[in-house]
Amino acid sequence: MTTRYTYTAVLFDSKKVTFLIVIVLTVKFSPVTETGSAATKLTKQNSNSRSSHSKDSVLKFTHTTSRTRRNSSKSLGELRLFLTPSTNSEISWIISDQSKISPNILDESKISWATLDGNRIFLDVLDRAENKPEGLCPQECKCDTNLTYADCSQQFGRLKHIPQLPLSIRYLNFSFNNLTSINDTHFFQNVTQLQGLDISNNGLNYVKPGSFTAVTKLQGLFLSYNNLNYSSLAFVFEVPSLIFLEMIHLIPALGPIPEGWFSQRRQIKALETLVLHDNSLGDVNLKVFRPLCKLKRLGVGYNEVYHLYSDYMPSLEHLILHTNRLYDFPVTCDWHNKSFFPRLREMYLNANSISSMKLTVCLPGLQFLDLSRNSFVELLPWSFSSRNQRFPRLEWLRIRYNTVRLKKIHRFAFASESLQLVSLLENQLNFSSESTVHPDAFAGCPKLRILQLQNNNFRGISDEKFQHLFSRNVPSLQHLSLSYCQMSSITTFTFNGLANLTILYLNQNAFLSIPNGAFDSLISLKLLLLNDNLVSYIGSATFNARLRQQLDSLALNGNMFTCDCNVLWFQAWLASNYSLFHPPYVYSEYSCANLPGIDLMHFYLAPQSCLLPHQDYIFVVVALTLMFAAMTLAVTLYRYRWHIKLLLYEGSNGSVERRRLYQEGAGWRYDLYVSYADEDVMWVRQHLMPRLEATGLRLCVRDRDFPPNKPEIHSIERCLEASKKMMFVFSASYGRDEMKTFEVTLCLRHALDHGDRPLVACLYDIPSRDMTIDMMAVMKTCPYMLWNEDDDVIASFWGRLLLSMSEVMSSRPVEIVS
């Protein structure tokens, strides 16, 4: 026979006061196995909303009990659950890294209370009832099926008193009722058996002394968001049975705690949990809490605490100091190196400004330490060591979202014989660089099981360093989170040596492909996340047969799958293993990247289209590739034909001699043929012709020397044949004249046939958009002379031009004017 309990936890969001969540935890205990091991399965269901401001969520656990431990806790995820001694069991809850819920449910003999991260929870073991008895719960309230919890909240002034409730009611939510004062000592007369009471968010500013004497069994009280100060809080300490007290954000803020304030109220001896978040306490001296001799849990977050003055707190187990302004790690050792907190199990120091760890730390019982959102620059060796009584029992360590760049993690920084979880996510650490993360950073951690390293940089990390970091130094590693780590490739050797790894997160990286057999060495792997990468192909060899049978969950959604013949095997595997590929936390679909809007499961390809043998397919691809390459080469050669011809002729050994013989053996009519655009005729007439013809050179100019009754093409050819050299006058107008394109072709052909090099004059800077391919070819292979309005440029132009014409003018004396 199995035993079934129902845990009712009410979660109030203190930041969004209109939001209420009721969580029911159903625990089913099965008979003990021979090994006494525990296995937990979590499912989640959403039910209909109870009101416009509420939402129900049912969480069910199935657990195998263990006789080996009592009143213990075990944590494998974000939520840590502590059971009461009467249940004689333990529960572990594994939830995803993305979860934002992380409450602590604390052990008590009759009732359990917890407060964390601005939310509060109260919990009790209830008998399960099938139907709610009719007529027992007032119209203004809602009651659970066991008539143990009553919700009379959010009446906003319509409810001035507590209605008649069943005597079985133990927990009353009376928040958001505009209850500004309690003037009647009989106010709680209808609920004398209360154990939990929430009167937060009421604007409460006065309570008549003696009002709480009727609730002699009250153990939990929520007073947050009321208008109370130290003097008006005296009524709270009329309740000697109180073990849990929450006073978050009282208005106006409480301010610093007066010295000796708790010592004057010794009647409240049972208090174990005190939550004072967001009250502007300023510097906190723990000495003020010493009269609370049973205090186990203290919350002073959001209080602008600059300095924490430690004192001996022998019963304290949970200390919440997050979101303050601490610059130093708290002093934990007295003058004799004895611990101020010998029983402290959990410490929350996240969201402060701590930059380094103290050399001396005395926390012999600490199991959980949160140092996220601080200002660490480096982590020195042995910072969290289990030696010398620093952290001999530390199991969980969080250093997330560091507010400055963490420049260095030294060797043995996390060395600890007890450490089981290290979370370093969102730190932008470069694990590829040994100057940032030493290969032995995790060395000395024989029990380390969980590493959360999301949102760091693993780009380009070598297999050697990866294996040194994890395979060699973390032999017990079971859970490795490498999401958002900029990884683009892995090999078949990357994960060698991780024989105990059961959970591997590689989602949201940049993998283009997965090598065959990359995960075959992970003989214990159960869950693998590879979703939201760029993988286009998964084949039968990507995961071997053993691994495919071994995996419980595999996420490959959100990748860039190419839907063709190669995807058919993966499609069939996906269809035949629906549960494997659809775990509860996967929401996107498997789709075809090359076929927008097509789901991979609905992709269809006729079998005949995939019948071409692989070798034939390769042959066709190679043949087409060669044909394409040949066509590309032919087009390229044709496009740059004049570049190539000019270079070949330029490199010819006989070109100079051939040109000399050509010039000497002909009777020339002109010394220089000038090719120019119509728009540049004025420059030719005003500058070029007067200067060159003054030296005795004979120029062939189209507007003067072409016969008027002959076709222009014929005239160009005849004049080229009658000229010793040719000259191009390039300008922006030249490239826009289609006739000039043909003239350039004729001139270049003539130059190549006779082994000559044309002269090039460039009028001003010509935009590339106005240049033809042939013009660019000429300017790249022939030196050109630039002309503009600058006097030095003009002088250089004439000097170079006359020097280039010197061999033509060698038979006559020429004076070169600079």
Image (tube, rainbow, N blue to C red):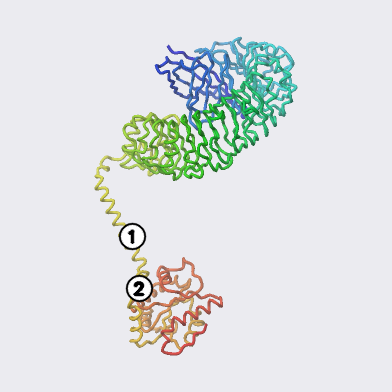
Q: From the top left corner, tell me how far across and down residue 615 is, in percent.
A: 24, 47
Kindly indicate the quadrant of the structure image that contains residue 503. Answer: top left
Q: Residues within 10 Å of mark 2 (few under 14, many from 20)?
A: few
Residue at image point 36% right, 38% down: 518
Q: Residue 426 or 55: which is nearer the viewer?
A: 426
Tag 2 residue: 651
Q: In this rendering, is residue 595 above or below 773?
A: above
Kindly indicate the quadrant of the structure image that contains residue 703. Answer: bottom left
Three-letter amino acid code at the position of disc 1: Thr
How many dots with numbers? 2
**Mark carried by residue 632:** 1
Q: Is residue 665 left or right of residue 377?
A: left
Q: Is residue 561 left or right of residue 425?
A: left
Q: Residue 441 or 751: which is nearer the viewer?
A: 441
Q: From the top left corner, tell me how far across and down residue 744 is, in percent.
A: 39, 74
**Mark carried by residue 268:** none
In the picture as drawn, the residue positioned furthest to the front comes out as: 336
Q: Is residue 566 left or right of residue 255?
A: left
Q: Nearer the viewer, mark 1 or mark 2?
A: 2
Q: Residue 128 or 269: which is nearer the viewer?
A: 269
Q: From the top left corner, tell me how far across and down residue 771 is, in percent.
A: 45, 68
Secondary element under disc 2, as helix, strand or loop, is helix
Secondary element under disc 1, as helix, strand or loop, is helix
